[in-house]
Image (cartoon, coloured by chain):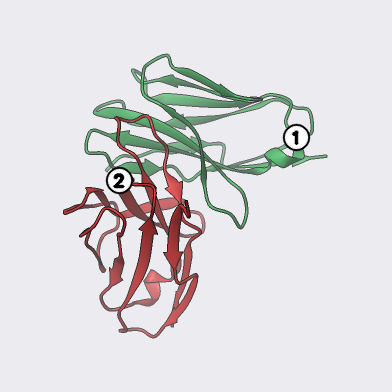
Chain colours: A green, B red
Amino acid sequence: ILNVEQSPQSLHVQEGDSTNFTCSFPSSNFYALHWYRWETAKSPEALFVMTLNGDEKKKGRISATLNTKEGYSYLYIKGSQPEDSATYLCASMDSSYKLIFGSGTRLLVRP
Amino acid sequence: NAGVTQTPKFQVLKTGQSMTLQCAQDMNHEYMSWYRQDPGMGLRLIHYSVGAGITDQGEVPNGYNVSRSTTEDFPLRLLSAAPSQTSVYFCASRLTGGGNYGYTFGSGTRLTVV
């Protein structure tokens, strides 16, 4: 079973700050890396799916990078807003198509 | 499209009872999975399916059964409920097409076993 780790566990930032989180995953049998955004009392929503080493994806102020050789991905948020407050989950899929989640980074953006 | 529909939303069971959590999707997604969410532990994979007639175990399969007789439905059966199965259960589905599609999640079923 994959071991997916995220850091930090939680993060408090001021509105306007930029921030980033780390996801590490086993690089052997790697197939895809997912990022999800999970707001309180809602269901997780997919942000990015990345498959290739060196992939970079962007959606508005949020972007992500992928390094499959060393087994890590970064999620960046530029100019954090209070509405960015959520738990950010990463998940790794191996060649058996299991998608295994990390325990998440909880972000709180103070106005 | 309704997306991924889970029923019931809430359920209280007594220890030893059995029940089935329902999950249906109308997006013609091949992949479906069941996760449980416990405080401090994120989402843990129970069982998953890559298509009708095909199921496999995830990280925490004990005490749960699944079947996938149609593309649309992926029910999760608790055989003999235990307090350790108190959790929030999420069903999710996605297209195949390699690794390029994210999962769509249902709204969850909150289960309490007393």
At 68% across and 42% down in the image, what residue appears?
A: A85
Q: Is residue A95 left or right of residue A101?
A: left
From the image, state whether disc 2 or disc 1 is nearer to you: 2
Disc 2 sits on a residue from what chain?
B
Looking at the picture, does residue B42 appear above or below residue B15? Answer: above
At 42% across and 37% down in the image, what residue appears?
A: B102
Quadrant the N terminus of chain A occupies: top left
Q: Could you say where residue B4 lies in the image, as x and y percent from the top left?
A: 43, 55
Q: Amino acid at mark 2?
A: Tyr
CA distance separating discs 2 and 1: 34 Å
Quadrant the C terminus of chain A occupies: top right
User: Based on the displayed image, in which of its 4 quarters is residue B113 positioned?
Assistant: bottom left
Q: Residues within 10 Å of mark 2 (few under 14, many from 20)?
A: many
- Determine contact: label 2, label 1, CB under 8 Å: no
The foreground one among B110 and B26 is: B26
Disc 1 sits on a residue from what chain?
A
Could you tell me which secondary element the residue under label 2 belongs to? Answer: strand
Q: Which residue is mark 1?
A: A81
At 69% across and 24% down in the image, what residue appears?
A: A78
Q: Residue furthest top?
A: A54
Q: Amino acid at mark 1?
A: Gln
Q: Could you say where residue B25 lies in the image, as x and y percent from the top left?
A: 38, 54
Q: Is residue B103 left or right of residue A96?
A: right
Q: Could you say where residue B88 lies in the image, as x and y percent from the top left?
A: 47, 64
Q: Is residue B89 visible?
A: no
Q: Which residue is mark 2?
A: B31
Q: Residues within 10 Å of mark 1 (few under 14, many from 20)?
A: some
At 48% across and 61% down in the image, what residue appears?
A: B108
Q: Is residue A55 visible?
A: yes
